[in-house]
């Protein structure tokens, strides 16, 4: 199901690419978020594929997505829509790991299944990495996923991040693949600048 949520009073774009518009979330995104987080394949590497409830979207997800970070003066999560149609695709994240320190930011993304395999995740991730280093004062971009999440790992690599380490965490509820642990990728400003030179 496709959602077109942009309204005349929607917040202005934070970032635009050739095919994407990333803009601050509003509470109007709740229906699209519910559909996104109810897809078992989208949630496979997050909670084993369990759907998120409307109550959880209202009480946990939206407050996190609407949070402003004092150190950057921006939000850390942005609604992603297809530029040509305004269709809600999901979200991207580039938020400070510490709310009061803008130098280390975490990259993330969650897109609906219909947009997979079309390069949207890589396009948005690359644009956010560049924005982090050029406008937001980042010195290091980090990203994490389950070791078995090959799709997400490919996006991190295509966005310029490189493998840093593998590690394990205690999961409250083990899900398929969690026994293989997590991986962290990173890109530093120095490496980013060297590649652009």
Image (tube, grey):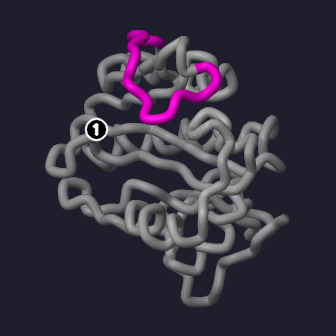
Rendering quarter of residue 52: bottom right
Q: Is residue 13 magenta?
A: no
Residue 145 coordinates in the image, percent (x, y): 51, 27
Secondary structure mostly seen in the magenta stretch = loop
Q: Residue at x 68, y 68 (%)?
A: 32
Q: Residue at x 48, y 21 (%)?
A: 161
Q: Is residue 115 above or below residue 191?
A: below
Taking the view exactly as shown, the residue that stands out farthest to the front is: 173
Location of the C terminus (image quadrant): top left
Which one is in front, 82 or 31?
A: 31
Location of the N terminus (image quadrant): bottom right
The answer to whether residue 144 is left or right of residue 88 is: left
The answer to whether residue 94 is left or right of residue 46 is: left
Rendering quarter of residue 142: top left
Which one is in front, 13 or 197?
A: 13
Q: Which residues are magenta?
A: 163-177
Q: Residues within 10 Å of mark 1 (few under 14, many from 20)?
A: many
Q: Residue beneath label 1, please?
A: 138
């Amino acid at each position: 199901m496709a959602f077109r949520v942009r309204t005349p009073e929607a917040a202005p774009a934070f970032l635009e690419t050739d095919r994407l518009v990333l803009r601050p979330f509003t509470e109007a995104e709740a229906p699209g978020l519910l559909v996104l987080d109810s897809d078992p394949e989208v949630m496979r590497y997050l909670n084993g594929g369990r759907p998120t409830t409307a109550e959880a979207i209202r009480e946990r997800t939206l407050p996190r997505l609407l949070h402003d970070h004092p150190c950057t003066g921006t939000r850390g999560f942005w609604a992603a829509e297809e530029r040509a149609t305004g269709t809600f695709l999901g979200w991207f994240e580039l938020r400070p790991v510490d709310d009061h320190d803008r130098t280390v930011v975490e990259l993330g993304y969650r897109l609906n299944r219909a947009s997979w395999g079309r390069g949207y995740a890589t396009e948005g991730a690359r644009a956010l990495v560049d924005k982090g280093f050029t406008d937001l004062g980042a010195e290091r971009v980090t990203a994490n996923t389950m070791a078995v999440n090959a799709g997400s790992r490919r996006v991190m690599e295509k966005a310029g991040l490189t493998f840093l380490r593998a590690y394990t965490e205690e999961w409250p509820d083990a899900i398929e693949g969690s026994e293989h642990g997590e991986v962290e990728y990173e890109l530093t400003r120095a490496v980013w600048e060297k590649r652009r030179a």
